[in-house]
Image: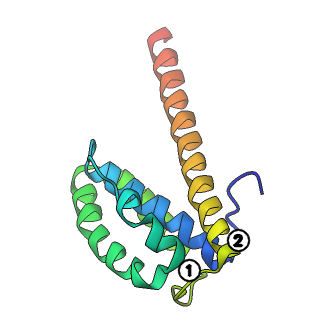
Amino acid sequence: MVHLDTGSQDAGYLCGRLLAVLEAVQRAAIPGAKATITDRFYGTASSAPASVFGNLLRKSQAHLAKLRKDRPGTERALQGRLEEIQVPLASFPRTLNLEQQGLFGLGYYHQRAQDRADAIAHKQQQDDTEVVNVQS
């Protein structure tokens, strides 16, 4: 795997992706936050997901509500990602073994890299549209 694997059913990989999206929700709702959920919960989330994800998902609802009011398109996109990632999970694993912890890390960083690439492509598309509008 050298890119985001949206078809992966591995619980560790999915939990890593989920943490990345929850962090994106927080960053979108609170730009410039000094500490992210990843700063605080990466270690526990990568080794004992069941002990932390319920709380993180509950707390993310306030951020999503803020985005729903201020940036509804962003909220819909992030909510869709949260849903897509969690559909294959029947429950959060109590613990992850070392191999699964490695897959957690890959899922987290693959998701972040994909999100960054999508943001760059979106910005480029906006810039291209502005150039066309100016030339018209």
> 111 left or right of 29?
right
* Mark toward the start of the polypeptide (2 vs 1): 2
User: What amino acid is labelled 2 in the image?
Assistant: Ser
**Quick one: SS at disc 1?**
loop
Q: Farthest right residue?
A: 1
Residue visible at 46% across and 85% down in the picture: 50
Judge by depth and name the residue closer to the eye, 98 or 20.
98
Using the rendered view, name the quadrant where residue 90 is placed: bottom right
Report the side of 130 relative to 25 (left or right): right
Q: Residue 48: x and y, percent?
A: 49, 81
Q: Label for residue 125?
A: none
Residue nearest the observer in this picture, 94 or 3 = 94
The reply to whether residue 80 is visible in this rendering is no
Q: Which residue is mark 1?
A: 87
Exactly how many numbered labels are in the figure?
Answer: 2
What colour-coding does the image apply?
rainbow
The answer to whether any part of residue 21 appears in the image is yes
Q: Which residue is mark 2?
A: 8
- Quadrant where the N terminus lies? bottom right
Do the numbered discs 2 and 1 sit on residues whose CB atoms are within 8 Å? no
* Label 2, residues with CA under 10 Å away: few <14, some 14-19, many ≥20: few
Residues under labels 2 and 1: Cα distance? 11 Å
Residue 75: percent from left, percent from top: 36, 58
